[in-house]
């Protein structure tokens, strides 16, 4: 599912992972265009590495949560119902290889970048683990 995350529905995100016996990861991006562009390139490089090396981590994209101010860039949260734990992968600057290694530590291996909401929904219905990136606006070239 694609969630517009705020305090009123944040628990729903965790509940979804628990009910479906899977894991969700949410990427929060800081509202600063220069940093957004810089870090997004590293995220894209990581996605390419995962894809080319034959892993099976799903990488999705969505617009950023409205009205949600993020202090760090990026902050990544994993919700894994099996362990019943929440993991913060990283808060500080990481380069593509470090991002790749950290994702592999938690999520089973493959990468997919979605070109449409329909493609995202189809994958979501069959994916055991799902990573979703939140981007600046619905009409962004990156969404």
Image (spheres, helix red, strand yellow):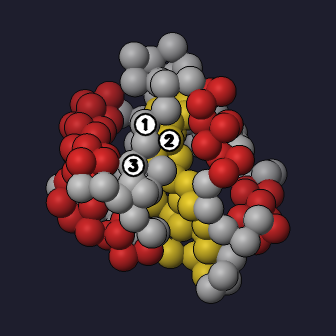
Q: Residue at (65%, 46%) from the top-left corner? A: 124
Reply above or below: 57 against 60.
below
Mark 2 nearby-residue class (10 Å; few <14, some 14–19, many ≥20):
many
Residue occupied by mark 2: 60
Q: Residue furthest front?
A: 54
Rendering quarter of residue 108: bottom left
Work out whether residue 82 can be spotted: yes
Distance from Cα at disc 2 to Cα at disc 1: 6 Å
Q: Earlier in the sequence, mark 3 or mark 2?
A: 2
The label number, if any, that marks residue 131 in the structure image: none
Task: Give the image location of residue 94, x and y in percent.
Answer: 22, 59
Distance from Cα at disc 3 to Cα at disc 1: 7 Å
Task: Give the image location of residue 131, x and y in percent.
Answer: 51, 53
Work out whether residue 133 can be spotted: no
Residue occupied by mark 1: 113
The label number, if any, that marks residue 111 in the structure image: 3
Proximity of marks 2 and 1: CB atoms separated by less than 8 Å: yes
Q: Residue furthest bottom?
A: 83
Proximity of marks 3 and 1: CB atoms separated by less than 8 Å: yes
């Amino acid at each position: 599912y694609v969630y517009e995350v705020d305090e009123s529905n944040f628990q729903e995100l965790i509940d979804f992972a628990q009910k479906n016996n899977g894991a969700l990861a949410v990427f929060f991006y800081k509202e600063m265009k220069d940093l957004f562009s810089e870090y997004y390139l590293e995220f894209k490089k990581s996605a390419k590495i995962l894809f080319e090396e034959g892993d099976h981590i799903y990488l999705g994209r969505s617009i950023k949560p409205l009205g949600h101010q993020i202090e760090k860039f990026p902050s990544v949260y994993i919700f894994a119902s099996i362990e019943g734990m929440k993991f913060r992968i990283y808060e500080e600057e990481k380069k593509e290889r470090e991002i790749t290694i950290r994702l592999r530590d938690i999520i089973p291996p493959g990468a997919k970048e979605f070109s449409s909401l329909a493609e995202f929904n189809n994958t979501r219905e069959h994916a055991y683990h799902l990573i979703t990136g939140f981007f600046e606006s619905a009409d962004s070239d990156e969404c």
